[in-house]
Amino acid sequence: MSKEIIRGLSMNAMDANDLLAENPAAGLGGLTGHTFRKWRQLGLGPAYIKISARCIRYRRGDVLAWLEARRVQPVRGNVEAREPAAAR
């Protein structure tokens, strides 16, 4: 499925239980399959399903939940942290 088609689909059409190969799963977060592979070896990254030694799949919903858990909301008001050391 092309990216143009995917962008137009709602989450109903793209089920959270859809199984994705390494590259498409990593692409949801703008990452590479290589990054997901390394993180998996280190015990990091989203949950995955090991179908066989050479067949790994990720649930779309697991990847999206993992990305959302890493979302950082910027905090305003800490001016000192934003000023260069020489300006203090």
Image: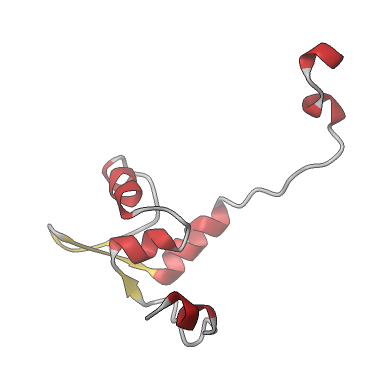
Left or right side of 80 for 21: left
Left or right side of 51 for 42: right
Name the image quarter holding the C terminus: top right
Residue in the picture at 39% in, 50% down: 45
Left or right side of 26 for 69: right
Instruction: Point out residue 14 in the picture as x, y percentages from the top left corner.
Output: 45, 82
Instruction: Point out residue 82 in the picture as x, y percentages from the top left corner.
Output: 79, 29
Colouring: secondary structure
26, above or below 7, in the image: above
Tally of marks: 0
Residue in the picture at 84% in, 32% down: 78
Instruction: Point out residue 29 in the picture as x, y percentages from the top left corner.
Output: 48, 58
Residue in the picture at 39% in, 77% down: 17
Report which quarter residue 2 is drawn in: bottom left
Which is nearer the eye, 62 or 85? Answer: 85
Residue in the picture at 52% in, 81% down: 11
Name the image quarter holding the N terminus: bottom left
Report which quarter residue 83 is drawn in: top right
Which is nearer the eye, 15 or 7? Answer: 7
Which is nearer the eye, 23 or 70? Answer: 23
Which is nearer the eye, 2 or 10? Answer: 2
78, above or below 10, in the image: above
| Residue ranking furthest to the bottom | 13
Report which quarter residue 39 is drawn in: top left
| Residue ranking furthest to the left | 53
